[in-house]
Image (cartoon, rainbow, N blue to C red):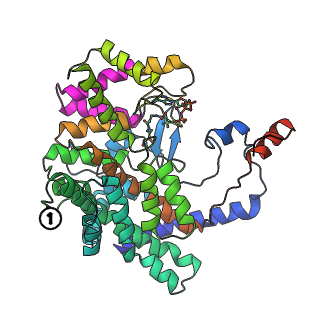
Amino acid sequence: MEYIKNRFYEKASKCINEYNKLKRDHGDKVIANVTIGQVMTGMKGVPSLITDTSKLDPQEGIRFRGYSIPELREKLPRLNPEGEPLPEGLFYLLLIGEIPSQEDVMNLSKDWSTRSHVPQHVYDVIDAMPKNAKPMTQFSAAITAMATESLFQKAYRSGIGKKHYWDFIYDDVMNLIAKLPRVAAYIYRRNFHNGDHIEPNRKLDWAGNLAHMMGHDSEEVKRLLRLYMVIHSDHEGGNVSAHATHLVGSALSNPYYSFAAGMLGLAGPLHGYANQDVIHWIFDMLDELDTDNPSKEQLADYVKKTLEEGRVIPGYGHAVLRKTDPRFTAQQEFADKYIKNDKLVNIVNNLYEVVPPILGDIGKIQNPWPNVDAYSGALLYHYGIKEYTFYTVLFGVSRALGVLASLIMDRVYGLPIERPSSFELKWYIEKATGQSGSCI
Ligand code: HAX
């Protein structure tokens, strides 16, 4: 699919000129000061990354190349007027910065289909692991094992020059994205359906095929996964999975290694693991209350108890957002449209009324509102994808679209190895107070 690559490079080369001019002419310009508070709260708000694919506004939520989620649901090509946009179109937008035509999207879908073969040794690596190895352990190991396919790694060894890196990274990225649904579905069927695997249907789109290979073939599940893959794809550059992918890529590790690193970050409970934690936490609550239909008072009591135990309420809060996550709202709208009277969905909706005022009253929590992970599990569960330890893998398949599009741009710009400075605690104490600290 050379024309997509060519179209990408045609646009990207304008960016290279701007990048080089900025670096050459304005390298000394001061754009921000860093406070001790920012160092101690995970560098929040410190501009230090270049990410073109999406931008997160604390009040408004994510925009992908300038488009909000409702705009994307209207403008991106879909298979039929009733359906959800195809993730292929979103990837095209992230990469090239333009809403693609239906033909571009179908061509990209076909391109990924031709690249989707997964080598046997990757399945062998998965099969070598005990069944109780977490799905994210299997997923990240499988991605690492696929690095045998890296064209960039081979080209680098053969001595290609810097300005050609992006070309090989591009093909690695396309190949990796194309293979992910097959790998994810393999892990799913291995763990939860006795290894009864389902062959891909080459006529299906990327997300539709994932639903098919998982064994959840209804049109509604395919629609859900298309929406899911679009909204989880990207959240600017500083989140853990995006930043880890970018950081490891800055050492010129191949895209398979870089993305595997991102996935190990996504597996943390404060990040993508929250999507399984939400369901786990709700089921623990239902067990403890001995009901499948808790009242709002019971929900409130359980939320307070969780907080008293020093635990977080999964699916609530965000490092940047300061309002309800539009990704939560998009999923709620999907549920409103397709789902009537589902107990778990009702609980999630009731939690949305109950949790924010309780978190707000604590005072220290910057954002009491729900994030993307508060809703996704209830939708998947409703459609029979009940194995919630798998949910973070689905998030990971989607996240590939954003972080890997950015990885191509990183190499187009020729971004250097990333190397922020670290200092001992006493250095910061001295800076802040003029006196030396007393700790070791
Ligand atoms: N429940 C209880 N306490 C919470 C909380 C929540 N949902 N959210 C924040 N807090 C606490 C923090 O733990 C922190 O406590 P300490 O001062 O005692 O350390 C305090 O409130 C201030 O935190 P903050 O500044 O509001 O939030 P952070 O930027 O530090 O953290 C998190 C953002 C998303 C990690 C946090 O809100 C959280 O732990 N939420 C629950 C887990 C979750 O849903 N994670 C998924 C986030 C979205 C995502 O990445 N998806 O993949």
Answer yes or no: is residue 193 visible.
Answer: yes
Q: Give the residue displayed 28% in from the left and 74% down from the top.
A: 121
Residue 139 within the segment the image draws in magenta: no
The residue where tag 1 is placed is 199
Q: Give left or right: position of 337 versus 233.
A: left
Q: Is residue 185 above or below residue 281?
A: below
Quadrant housing the N terminus: bottom left
What range is drawn magenta here? 325-354
Residue 327 within the segment the image draws in magenta: yes
Q: Is residue 175 above or below residue 368?
A: below
Q: Is residue 233 above or below residue 152?
A: above
Q: Residue 312 appears at what percent x and percent y? A: 45, 30
Q: Give left or right: position of 434 versus 159.
A: right
Closer-to-camera residue (195/181):
195
Q: Give the residue displayed 53% in from the left and 59% down from the top.
A: 246
**Crowdedness of circle 1 by 10 Å Cα count: few (<14), some, many (20+)?**
few
Answer yes or no: is residue 96 visible.
Answer: no
> Residue most toward the front?
440
Closer-to-camera residue (128/192):
128
Q: Give the residue displayed 17% in from the left and 57% down from the top.
A: 213
Q: Quadrant of residue 102?
A: bottom left
Q: Residue 207 appears at what percent x and percent y? A: 25, 54
Q: Quadrant of residue 340?
A: top left
Amino acid type at image mark 1: Glu
Count of numbered labels shown in the rendering: 1
